[in-house]
């Protein structure tokens, strides 16, 4: 499953990458990663482009979905984002303190 997130121009790519490095810990994310980051226990991967984030969900467990939810809330607190899903198997993200538009 893929989650596509479009974020406003007020969030610069470099700022999103810095916050992602701060949130997603691990040796790979701190030393090697430039725009692809691995999630907790390699359950998902995050690919960051200009004004666009793609999250590839490998393990659809409740823990990983909760981790993705808290990651997006950390990045875009009190902000607007657009979310679309590819190959969604009934998984919806209900984000607190983030205004979401379903695309």
Image: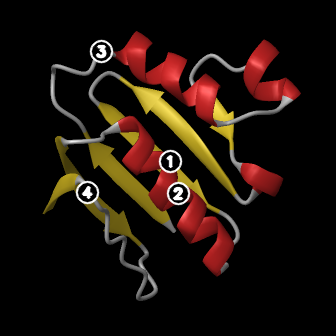
Residue 68 numbered mark, or none: 2
Query: Which residue shows up at 32% across the image and 21% down it?
Result: 50
Of residues 88 and 10, the one nearer the viewer is: 10
Q: Mark 4 points at which residue?
A: 83
Residue 71 numbered mark, or none: 1
Q: Closer to the observer: label 2 or label 4?
A: 2
Q: Can residue 34 be seen in this view?
A: yes
10 Å neighbourhood of mark 1: few (<14), some, or many (≥20)? Answer: some
Give whichever of discs 2 and 3 has the lower sequence position. Answer: 3
- Residue 101: x and y in percent read 12, 59
10 Å neighbourhood of mark 4: few (<14), some, or many (≥20)? Answer: some
Is residue 50 depicted above or below 57 in this figure?
above
Q: Is mark 3 on a helix, strand or loop?
A: loop
Q: Are marks 3 and 4 in contact (CB under 8 Å)?
A: no
Q: Are marks 1 and 4 in contact (CB under 8 Å)?
A: no
Give whichever of discs 2 and 4 has the lower sequence position. Answer: 2
**Which image quadrant is residue 21 in?**
top right
Q: Distance between the residues labelled 2 and 4?
A: 13 Å
- Residue 2: x and y in percent read 47, 61
10 Å neighbourhood of mark 3: few (<14), some, or many (≥20)? Answer: few
**Which image quadrant is residue 52 in?**
top left
Q: Are marks 1 and 2 in contact (CB under 8 Å)?
A: yes
- Residue 61: x and y in percent read 67, 79
Q: Closer to the observer: label 3 or label 1?
A: 1
10 Å neighbourhood of mark 2: few (<14), some, or many (≥20)? Answer: many
Q: Is mark 1 on a helix, strand or loop?
A: helix
Q: Is residue 103 visible?
A: no
Give whichever of discs 3 and 4 has the lower sequence position. Answer: 3
Identify the residue at the far bottom of this view: 90
Q: How far apart are marks 3 and 1 (CA)?
A: 17 Å
Q: Mark 3 points at which residue?
A: 12
């Amino acid at each position: 499953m893929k989650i596509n997130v479009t974020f406003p121009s007020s969030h610069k790519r470099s700022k999103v990458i810095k916050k992602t490095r701060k949130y997603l810990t691990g040796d790979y994310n701190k030393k090697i990663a430039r725009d692809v980051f691995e999630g907790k226990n390699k359950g998902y991967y995050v690919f960051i482009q200009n004004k666009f984030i793609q999250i590839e969900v490998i393990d659809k467990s409740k823990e990983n979905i909760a981790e993705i939810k808290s990651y997006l809330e950390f990045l875009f607190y009190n902000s607007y984002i657009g979310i679309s899903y590819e190959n969604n198997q009934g998984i919806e993200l209900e984000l607190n303190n983030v205004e979401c538009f379903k695309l």
